[in-house]
Amino acid sequence: MTFLQCLAALGTETTTHSSAAQCVAYIACAEIPALQWPDLMERLVENVITPNKTEACKRSTLEGIGYICQDIDPCILASQSNAILTAIVCGMKKEEPSDSVRLAATNALLNSLEFTKHNFDVDNERNYIMQVVCESTQSPNPQIRVAALQCLVKIMSLYYSYMEPYMKQALFAITLGAMKDSVPEVALQGIEFWSTVCDEEIDLAIDVAECFEKGQPPAVSSMFYAKGALQFIVPILMEILAQQDESMDDDEWNPSKASGVCLMLLAQCCEDPIVNLVIPFVKENIKKPDWRYRDAAVMSFGSILEGPDPAALKPLVESAMPVIIELLRDESPAVRDTVAWTIGRVCETLPEVALHEAYLVPLLTGLVEGLSTEPRVAANICWAFSSLAESAYDAASENSGHNGEPRTYILSQYFNVITERLLATSSRPDGGQHNLRNAAYSALMALMRSAAQDCYCEVQRVTLIVLERLESIIGLEHQIVSHQDRAQFNDLQSLLCGTLQSVLRKISKEDAPVISDKVMLALMSMFRTTTTPTTEGSGDQSVINGETDKTKFSDGVQEDALLAVSALVEAVGESFVKYVNDFMPILVICLRNHRETQVCMNAVGLLGDMCRVLNKNLLPHCDGLITILMEILQDINAHKSLRPAILSTFGDLSLALGSEFWKYLPIVLETLSQATQAEVNLEDPDMVEYLNSLRTSCLEAYTGIIQGLKGDGPQSTAALEFVAGHVSHILSFIQHIGADSITTEDLISASCGLIGDLVSAYGSSILSLVEVDGIASVLQRGRRAKASRTKNLAVWATKEIRKLKNTTNSTTSVSNSSLSHTATTIQASPSG
């Protein structure tokens, strides 16, 4: 079918949704970016605004415009926004007799809002667009009302700064009316509008704080719409919370769930004022016979626990705890579910209340009992245990007065019971429902991470149980018969790897070697079942040389298994050397799997961990590893986030190999030089973050290279002399960082450390390069930084420069003094 045939087919179909419109959109999205079919939008606009066109033609044309706007890059259509809006607004007007045309036009507007900024910048055009949208929210047709409200939600997100006159005149009344609408889809959009307002104003508050620190005015100021509407919105939301149905699908997004989220956002946005609006509702309804009101009361209470001043909330939470604990045994699963969630929130925001001796025993009893109830309730209880364990550990660490692992904590005497019940919950036959199995293992991981010293025996026991489970499921590989079986099998492997990682980080250096063989055997067996090379290689070198490119991966399992190996490396240290030859082919396969970014990222991280403990034991494998890392850096299809991680790893390799790293210096330094010159679009926050990450990794790599080469014999001296040719570039890079407005404190910290290392390594030969304003400015920023590490590095680097300068001056002074003394002696000597 040709372009013209597609256009001619618009309006000729009898189906509800136009295939011709989709066809036009597909062709347009391919051709318009290539500057083909330039008059397409003009023709589509004519279809809509020409009076004698049929209703079907207008509808399908507007659908086509909507599809194009949805799928094409907004920048491409920005120049045609006037024509597009002309057609859309024409179709949306209340005078349009056809609801199907109005609906198609409203949906098209929703998809076009991102490239209409310059229309919103013009008062008259913006006023007209807002008028048409607001009129559409009053349509008798609920589908049109929903679409129009969706437009308002998106407009608030995109054009917040323009909304003040419309909020007072129309938006407040329209959205409150929508929230009360009997049509759930309409009510949902009314709630979403105020959630979006909160999102925007929370972000603006963060921006204001950041601008204040920098001494700059914010680009956009908050109008505090949420705070102004709070007293009107909150009562409606709480009533909607009480309208839920026991039979509601947990995955279905409905007004009741949206109300809970909106309440949470309002609490974060408005803070203290929300408390007095919610607490009366909670007190009135928490013991009501109707489970819906009990549930709404608990949900309202849990939703306001983050945002308001904890000191103001604490007495309210303390008085509510006995009732909340009692409700863990409520006859309604929905209420028990919400109670478990609320307890988790209490543990996160006011842990001292949950851990108070007056409530702890009944609370733990209720939670442990709840683990055997419905999956959705048990899953939230698992989350509550996670929060409780972490809060208990943090409290014990603070009270112990040092950063080490506390000897005991408040959960110690209950630790074994909780662990046993979580292990049992993780094996429930219905563990696949409501994410229960994942929640149970996550809670178990949190409990292991937060175990005090007197819980060590239980940590050992859990380690052996996890190992047994891992070994047993590996043997079940041959029983997998379906995709669902495979997904569950991989999920369980990942969970066991995650739990193994948690316990390995708690195992003592003395005990780790006892179990390391079993751990590595289990992990290697699992790697082999999830990594199947199509070409057999002889040893690790064949794999490194790239003979196993085609590989079957279970990527989620690979990610978690690599993290488990990292934990083992940390636990056994240099003893890991005995596994290197067998494990290296697997590490290489994971590094080569850079299409799965997280697998490759974890493999790079593991390589860094291995560098830190194996040192020169890695040398036999480094030729191949460096080659692979360079290939990833040069591959345009590899995700950009891999580059900073790999560049940092060059520093780790240098620290590990010392002077043996010299052979890689030419290619590594050239690669770093190119990376330091990277530029990005500074208007894109994600790209700015990436650039800062890239720069930090370059500084870390240079630091590792200098520290690794320094003081390692004659070969090291020669290598440092080779690096000396790059020192001027490195210091220019640091000056560029110091002058850049996007520079973070992490970059300043890394820069200060590198300056100190360079001065220490090269001495007076670089004094003239560091005694410049750009370097002084970086060090000054470092000394004024908030973080003590940054401040300490800056002070150290400054002292190194002063020490060097004083030594140089002293040497010069002594030299001048000697010359003067010699001259005097010559003058005083008798002539022949």
Image (cartoon, rainbow, N blue to C red):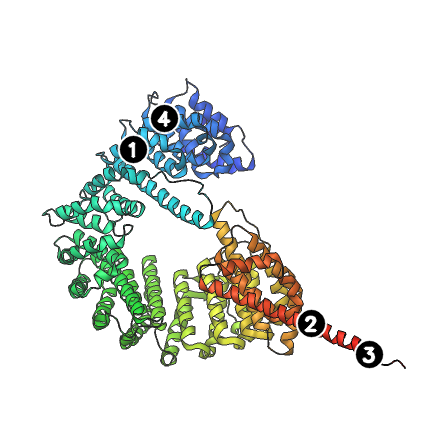
Q: Nearer the viewer, mark 2 or mark 3?
A: 3
Question: Which corner quadrant of the image does residue 414 belong to?
Answer: bottom left
Residue position for label 1: 172
Answer above or below: position of 543 versus 174. Answer: below
Residue 828 is tagged as 3
Location of residue 507 in the rendering, given as x and y in whole percent from the top left corner: 35, 75
Secondary element under disc 4, as helix, strand or loop, is helix
Question: Which corner quadrant of the image does residue 429 belong to?
Answer: bottom left
User: Label 3 to label 1, Cα distance in Å?
Assistant: 100 Å
Answer above or below: position of 8 versus 415. Answer: above
Identified at 34% across, 70% down, the residue is: 500
Residue 813 is tagged as 2
Q: Amino acid at mark 4?
A: Val
Q: Is residue 618 visible?
A: yes
Answer above or below: position of 564 versus 84. Answer: below
Location of residue 599 in the rendering, given as x and y in whole percent from the top left corner: 44, 61
Q: Earlier in the sequence, mark 2 or mark 3?
A: 2
User: Label 4 to label 3, Cα distance in Å?
Assistant: 104 Å
Image marks 2 and 3: residues in contact by CB distance under 8 Å: no
Of residues 194 and 104, the one nearer the viewer is 194
Image marks 4 and 3: residues in contact by CB distance under 8 Å: no
Q: Nearer the viewer, mark 4 or mark 3?
A: 3
Location of residue 123 in the rendering, given as x and y in whole percent from the top left corner: 43, 27
Q: Amino acid at mark 2?
A: Ser
Residue position for label 4: 132
Q: Nearer the viewer, mark 3 or mark 1?
A: 3
Q: Earlier in the sequence, mark 3 or mark 1?
A: 1
Identified at 21% across, 39% down, the residue is: 236
Secondary element under disc 3, as helix, strand or loop, is helix
**Where the C terminus falls, by quadrant?**
bottom right
Q: Nearer the viewer, mark 4 or mark 2?
A: 2
